[in-house]
Image: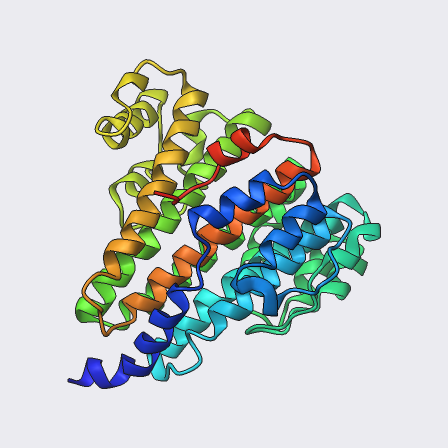
Amino acid sequence: MKSLARYAATNALTRTMLGELLKPKDYEALARAESLEGAWLALRKTPYEQWLPEEAPTEVLAIERATAEATALRFRRSVRSLKGKPREVGNLLLSRWELDNLEFTLRLWHARDISLSKFVSPLTLVNRIPLYDILEAESIEGVALALKDTPYFGPVSSSIAAYKRRKAIFFVEMELERDYYKRLLEATAALSGTDAKRAAKIVGAEIDIVNIVMLTRLVDYYEFKPEDFGAYAIPGPSEISRRLSTGVLSEKDIEDARTKVLSQYLPEASSAQLRDSISLLERVVREMAVDVARSALMGYPFSITCVFAFYLLKRNELENLRTIFGGKAIGVDEEEIMKHLYGLG
């Protein structure tokens, strides 16, 4: 009864918002549009209408900022009635959008390209991040100092040496990701009982996605050897992330993890090369994460689970929108765009 009373309002509100999620026919209309403006108009014919300006932005980064803000504000409604420890968890989930914005700002700072600062979102969700102070910082130490009153000071400070050695902001981002999910898992565990176990499963699904994406970037862009990845992977509760975050990885370890996950979905892919294996694993892990969220919503759970599941579905929706508008910006056709969307089944 305590759980029922604690989550009744949140469950009811979240259930209402599930009906606002984009459906396959909505994605098809977006992908079919002949231009960025056409896709924007198609999106405004969905429940996004009240969250987006009528006039279509002319630049894809402006569209990405607008859709990120819209998804964040729509998710924020699902956590507003939470109190106590559940509210702490809800705020951490909401701060995922804040972390995205911080990482984008760090990339601009690293590139010394303030011409794109207009695409940094000024929206404050949980913590006040001095984004423009970061852009004006003269060194990575100055960036860390600008973040001294936020939860992000620690991970940025601890990644300074790696940033200087590698000369890549990606290694700062990875430390921010590791810290974020550590805090989220700790806050989730503090809920205790069934609440914590169910929620941790959904957090684990997202950690799997982030780990696979990071592994792909490390292999493709930084020529990392698999045995080095364990030092950077995010420790998570799932078998995939536990395997990836071990101290030393070999190509066989990655192949074994891929085969175990993919065998029931894509058995014909067992002979794929390492990079193809990572790509295939990312696709299936994303689809599995959406399945985890949808399964968690079955039975009307009066727990924090409904918030976690809605969070994961909104994050997936945002990624799909980024794919669509990014594809439109470079002239990718409808069929190819649809191939790269997740969770439509």
Residue 315 percent coordinates (x, y)? 47, 55
Depth check: give the residue in front, 108 or 2.
Answer: 2
Depth check: give the residue in front, 202 or 53.
Answer: 53
* Quadrant hosting residue 31: top right
* Quadrant hosting residue 146: bottom right
Residue 143 percent coordinates (x, y)? 70, 59
Q: Residue at x 82, y 53 (%)?
A: 114
Residue 233 percent coordinates (x, y)? 42, 42
Depth check: give the residue in front, 326 or 166.
Answer: 326
Residue 77 percent coordinates (x, y)? 47, 75
Q: Residue at x 38, y 64 (%)?
A: 18
Image quarter (top left, top right, bottom left or bottom right) of the C terminus: top left
In the image: residue 74, left or right of residue 123: left
Q: How many marks?
A: 0
Above or below 344: residue 7: below
* Quadrant hosting residue 299: bottom left
Q: Residue at x 23, y 61 (%)?
A: 198
Q: Is residue 174 visible?
A: no
Above or below 240: residue 291: below
